């Protein structure tokens, strides 16, 4: 037992000496909180590393990229595969050419209504939580969002795959839903993978679970810029070594992109 504690204390000291941000890969299913809890256990419950937790917003600024796999012909209440099917429509009339042509209408500055199942709040509570409690929730008004690029990667009805680069506040689930409606059908998301967040990319930076070790993290760690005076005076984190994550829409429909 003494040996085990000595090893843990040694690892803890190493982790506490690090400052910065690193990206991890979140597979489908678990929420961001679930993944962080697993990571905390793997790293003796120290995840948010020093000043890195305070600079997360700054370092993740910029566009986001996603790869989404959608399924035509079925709509769900959450707009993704976790929800219940609420509508079915024909999709046989949709051609690849028509699909690609319609994508042009969803590029640039567009108006988008956020999904009901989202992290947006009503009376201080997430709309997704209120819906799960059986309460009635009205959709938020449409808002302006930015789509920098949108392309079709595969079209094999009923499934299709698209790549999208977007700004903050954008919902890929709403995009797939709106796109299918514009094509006189319906659809939902089967798979959604974030491939880029700010300066971090899935291929180059995201650590998968088998690499959640001190050695791999220390090598992947991105140094933090020095905080400005305004940032120093901002609200302090609850704990210096508590984890901080970038939320994603893949958390059972509870987050935005």
Image: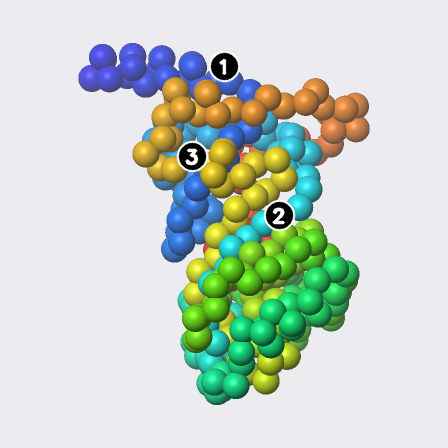
Pointer 2: what residue? 64
Q: Residue at x 47, y 81 (%)?
A: 73
Query: Which quarter of the figure has residue 176?
Result: bottom right
In this rendering, would 215 be left or right of 162? left
Crowd band around label 1 with a 10 angstrom C-alpha radius: few (<14), some (14–19), many (20+): few
- Which percent across, then down, holds residue 57? 66, 37
In this rendering, would 234 be left or right of 60? right
Pointer 1: what residue? 17
Observer able to see residue 55: yes
Question: In this figure, which colouring scheme has been used for the structure?
Answer: rainbow
Viewer-side residue, 107 vs 140: 107
Cα distance in 3D space between marks 1 and 2:
30 Å
Q: Tag on residue 207?
A: 3
In the displayed orientation, state which residue is furthest to the front: 97
Q: Nearer the viewer, mark 1 or mark 2?
A: 2
- Which percent across, then down, holds residue 90? 48, 87
């Amino acid at each position: 037992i003494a040996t085990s504690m000595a090893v843990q204390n040694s690892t803890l000291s190493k982790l506490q000496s690090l400052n910065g941000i690193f990206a991890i890969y979140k597979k489908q299913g678990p929420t961001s909180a679930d993944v962080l809890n697993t990571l905390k256990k793997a790293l003796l419950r120290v995840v948010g590393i020093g000043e890195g937790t305070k600079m997360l917003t700054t370092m993740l600024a910029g566009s986001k990229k996603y790869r989404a796999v959608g399924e035509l012909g079925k709509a769900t209440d959450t707009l993704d595969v976790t929800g219940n099917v609420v509508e079915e429509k024909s999709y046989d009339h949709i051609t690849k050419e028509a699909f690609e042509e319609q994508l042009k209408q969803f590029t640039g500055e567009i108006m988008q209504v956020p999904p009901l199942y989202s992290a947006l709040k009503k009376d201080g509570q997430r709309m997704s939580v209120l819906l799960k409690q059986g309460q009635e929730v009205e959709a938020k008004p449409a808002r302006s969002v930015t789509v920098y690029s949108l392309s079709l990667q595969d079209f094999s009805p009923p499934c299709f795959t698209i790549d999208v680069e977007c700004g903050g506040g954008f919902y890929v689930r709403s995009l797939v839903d709106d796109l299918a409606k514009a094509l006189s059908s319906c659809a939902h998301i089967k798979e959604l993978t974030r491939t880029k967040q700010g300066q971090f990319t899935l291929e180059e930076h995201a650590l998968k679970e088998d690499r959640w070790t001190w050695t791999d993290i220390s090598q992947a760690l991105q140094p933090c810029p020095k905080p400005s005076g305004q940032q120093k005076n901002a609200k302090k984190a609850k704990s210096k070594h508590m984890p901080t994550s970038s939320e994603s829409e893949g958390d059972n429909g509870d987050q935005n992109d």
